[in-house]
Amino acid sequence: MKYILTLLLMATALVANARTETLKSPDGNLELTFSLSEDGTPGYALSYSDREVIKPSPLGYTFRGDASAKDPKTYMRVSYDTVDMGSGFVFVDAVKSEFDETWEPVWGEESHIRNHYNELAVTLLKKDFKGKAGKDVVMVLRFRLYDDGLGFRYEFPAQDNLKYFIVMDELTQFRMTGDHTAWWIAGDYDTQEYNYAQTRLSEIRETLPKMIFNNASQHVVGPTAVQTSLQMKTDDGLYVNIHEAALVNYPTMTLILNEEDLSFKADLTPDAVGCRGRLCAPCTSPWRTVMVVDDARKVLASRIILNLNEPCALEDVSWIRPVKFMGVWWEMITGWRSWAHGSRLGHGADTENVKKYIDFAAEHGFDALLVEGWNEGWRDWFGNQKDEVFDFVTPFPDFDLPGLNEYAHSKGIKLMMHHETSSSVVNYERCMDDAFALMKKYGYDAVKTGYVGDIIPYGEHHYGQFMINHYNRVLKKAAEYEIMVNGHEAVRPTGLCRTYPNLVGNESAMGMEFRSRILPHHVTILPFTRLQGGPMDFTPGIFEMDMSRNNPNSTQQIHSTLCKQLALYVTQASPIQMAGDMPKNYERHPEAFRFIKDVALDWEKSVYLAAEPGDYIITARKAKGSGEWFVGGVTDENAREMTVSFDFLEPGRKYMARIYTDAKDADGVNNTPETGSESCAKYEIKEMKVTSKTKLKVKMAPSGGFAISIK
Ligand code: NOJ
Ligand code: CA
């Protein structure tokens, strides 16, 4: 009898701990359910109009316990016990609130952004932390539900029983409801420069090895690991996108698919000794985001990633400006010249050559010229891994640093600085102040940074906490000197440009430098994935697709029409945009070049006219200030005829449109020297009057596109 009573008491105690809380989005379509199971395991589920989107999925952590064993010979701490932070929680309280504000980004896809969500903050208690009686630890789970998605994060407030702690694993899962179609790149701790695959979730394992090719630094996470932002589509037409927002002082998340139940589990980038986050309360994780919408265009219009970031941290932002630039760059990418002085190829950043670029860029109204390979170190670095290669202040003898800056300024443009860190990160941090002071002295206001090669200190990864802190430190330091940053090979952005708007761009995906490797559907996917976190320095505007014409030793052929290159300035919004090609290739197409010169960089409003990941995107944007509109459309390997309805224009007004379309026989796919490498550069330009009632049929060639400017 006594036994049964005890059992009964235990059962009521357990049931008493079980808990469910629900939260609806402002429009009522999305519903979040938080649950705490009887054994104190926290979890969540998400539904859209009564359709399950995320099945009940666990939350929590594994922490490192105290050092438990030492290697008898080295006395190094070799093994650690772990602390379960995924169960055994007790419910404390749940607080709901609503938030609604409209804020103005310094630059971006629109001038006003509404941040409207309902919030649920659940406070849980882990009793007897590390088995110590009476030592309880508080963890808060904060959920924010928008009309177009969910954000949630872990919070550890300041408290007596938890200060410094080490994460060994984050247990967050995203359990899918079916074998969705997904657009993904392979999970990798060191590179994002892959083509996207479009497959069912169940096909990731067989497809992943085919998507891998060599890169300077690489660490494939596993046979079913994919990166965020991950775009999916359910068979009943919902677009589900998983990413993270506000990645600060924490490792980047990769997703590992378990094919048994089609669930993804968070995988945090490890540090050099295998730990996955060294934290100190008070602290929070980044937001985990699940966007859910019923129309692909709404993915492009979503602002949840930006909204989940903190407001602007910079008091004065008057020095942050959109920049259209050219570069002493493509000559090196195509192997025609070298970054290094003294190379047998010839040095790209030679004063005479740079002057020619300054003349051209200034004549055509550009704001800046990027010059790569200007500084000592390139020969020492090529092919080697060395700690102290660059000092970022010593120019090559043939690069007249003061003279060229003066020359550029006299022509009304600036030079853009290049800091290839060679991933020697501690060295860069040591040099940063001197490097930025030098930039200030000569009037540079923007730097393109780069992280090619394995991270030094060795063992660290591009997306580990060490590097996340580095990238953010660079941003803050640059802001002190009023310098804008465009980071290449840095972590995929997570909306931090809201807080630090001097983060004007990142590469962090496969850009035009990959030339023939880029699949025709790439740019129909990037805005759904990589661009969710912030703008990309994609380096578009390549007019010569046949690389042998730039460099007879190259056989590379870019699979894109010229008009598709124009469209990218609109479909892939960025406050910094490069015209990637060389002056001589623009000189051959002055009328088409005009679009690049005309197109705006900062927008009052964006309208997503048509979109389907992997197939096509058509976007219209209204320029901030001038009121001009620009439209861009891109397609994958398939030719398409689509109708553009100009109903985004103000009714009753007449506009003049200049329309750039692929010619009838243009072809961006079959454009090898054998099949006619000129076929991708065939286009037609016409001007016509348009009103809000105009409907225009446009044809896009295979891997083609179109662009329209409207005054
Ligand atoms: C890779 C960058 O993406 C590219 O733009 C740059 O030219 C090279 N690294 C050299 O730094
Ligand atoms: Ca790169």
Image (cartoon, rainbow, N blue to C red):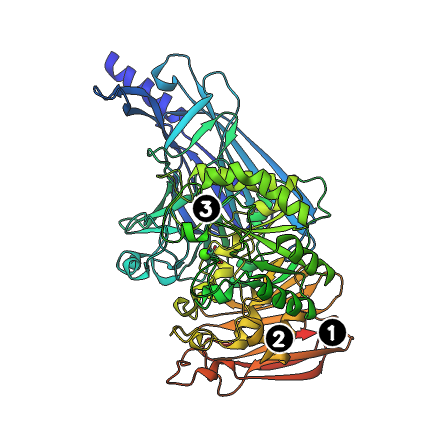
> Is residue 327 depicted above or below 124 in this figure?
below
Identify the mark at residue 593; answer none if there is no mark.
2
Q: Is residue 286 visible?
A: no
Mark 2 in CB contact with mark 1 (< 8 angstroms): no
Q: CA distance from mark 2 to mark 1?
A: 17 Å
Which amino acid type is shown beneath numbered disc 1? Lys
Q: Secondary structure at mark 2?
A: helix
Image location of residue 598, percent across then percent down:
68, 70
Q: Is residue 677 visible?
A: yes
Q: CA distance from mark 2 to mark 3?
A: 48 Å
Which badge, 2 or 1, comes first in the chain's sequence?
2
Q: Secondary structure at mark 3?
A: strand
| Horizontal side, residue 108 vs residue 275: left or right | right
Q: Which residue is mark 3?
A: 46
Which badge, 2 or 3, comes first in the chain's sequence?
3
Query: Within 10 Å of the Cα at label 1, are there few (<14), some (14-19), or many (20+) other Cα atoms?
Result: some
Query: Within 10 Å of the Cα at label 2, are there few (<14), some (14-19), or many (20+) other Cα atoms?
Result: some
Q: Is mark 1 within 8 Å of ligand 1?
A: no
Image location of residue 226, percent across then percent down:
36, 52
Q: Which residue is mark 1?
A: 711
| Horizontal side, residue 206 vs residue 458: left or right | left
Q: What residue is at 47 percent from the left and 84 percent from the top?
A: 679
Q: CA distance from mark 3 to mark 1?
A: 45 Å
Mark 3, mark 1: which one is toward the viewer?
A: 1
Which amino acid type is shown beneath numbered disc 3? Leu
In this rendering, the count of numbered labels is 3
Image-quadrant location for residue 109: bottom right
Identify the mark at residue 269; answer none if there is no mark.
none
Mark 3 in CB contact with mark 1 (< 8 angstroms): no
Which amino acid type is shown beneath numbered disc 2? Phe
Q: What residue is at 21 percent from the left and 19 percent from the top?
A: 72
> Is residue 344 depicted above or below 459 in this figure?
below
